[in-house]
Amino acid sequence: MFYRPSDGHGLPHNPFNAIVTPRPIGWISTHGSDGSDNLAPYSFFNGVAYVPPQVMFASTGSKDDRDGTKDSVANIRETGVFCVNVVEHAMKDVMNQTSGPWDAETDEFDLAKIEKAACSEIDCARVAATPAALECRMTQIVQIEGAANFVVFGEVVGVHLRDDCIVDGIFDVLRYNPLTRLGYRDYSVIRDKFSLNRPGE
């Protein structure tokens, strides 16, 4: 099968949603200039550089109460900071609860009964029980093709690691089984890992 996205695919659901998988989930917490907290998951998320450490996430929709974007991007525009919370399998249900199209004034931490903790370097809440949290200062917001598509880049200025996830000096993902997005309504869990040596090492 071949199709041009501009012509449509003819399938019941968009196959592009399931091609680039698995995708890590960035559970983005932000703090609005009005004092409100927000928490929402984004599966267009990844690390993009080591030195300095940098991450990105993309927001691809809009809400009527947020001027062409969603709460996360709107808050980051106002404050210039955000926190990325890592999602473990045990958090799948509360993470999903925070993905709804809630009003801007809704505090998803309270909605899903998620304990907050204060960030150390930025004015923002984080998920207290997350395996890892990345405190970020926004470096740029780029609008890409499409009416409501924005990519947010941030420099990581603070890192929280849950102590039980550090094993023999490494941050061990098998201690918490990361949740990943596959597409459509499908998710997966990382429970196995293996190592490969690069040629020449």
Image (cartoon, rainbow, N blue to C red):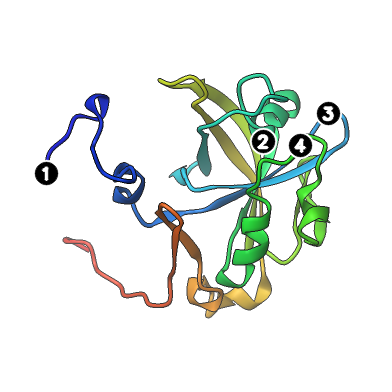
Above/below status of 111 relative to 51:
below
SS at badge 4: loop
Residue at label 2? 72
Q: Do callouts 4 and 1 mark residues in contact (Cβ within 8 Å)?
A: no
* Residue 161, horizontal then vertical, whole percent: 65, 64
* Residue 101, horizontal then vertical, whole percent: 66, 40
* Residue 178, horizontal then vertical, whole percent: 51, 67
| Circle number at residue 1 | 1
Amino acid type assigned to the residue bearing label 3 in the image: Ser
Identify the residue shown where x is 58% and y is 74%. 166
| Circle number at residue 33 | 3
SS at badge 1: loop
Amino acid type assigned to the residue bearing label 4 in the image: Asp
Image quarter of residue 192: bottom left
Residue 173 in view: yes
Q: Is residue 191 left or right of residue 111?
A: left
Identify the residue shown where x is 70% and y is 35%. 81
Residue at label 4? 103
Q: Split into 4 quadrants, where in the image is the C terminus?
A: bottom left
Q: CA distance from mark 3 to mark 1?
A: 49 Å
Q: CA distance from mark 2 to mark 4?
A: 12 Å
Q: Do callouts 2 and 1 mark residues in contact (Cβ within 8 Å)?
A: no
Image quarter of residue 117: bottom right
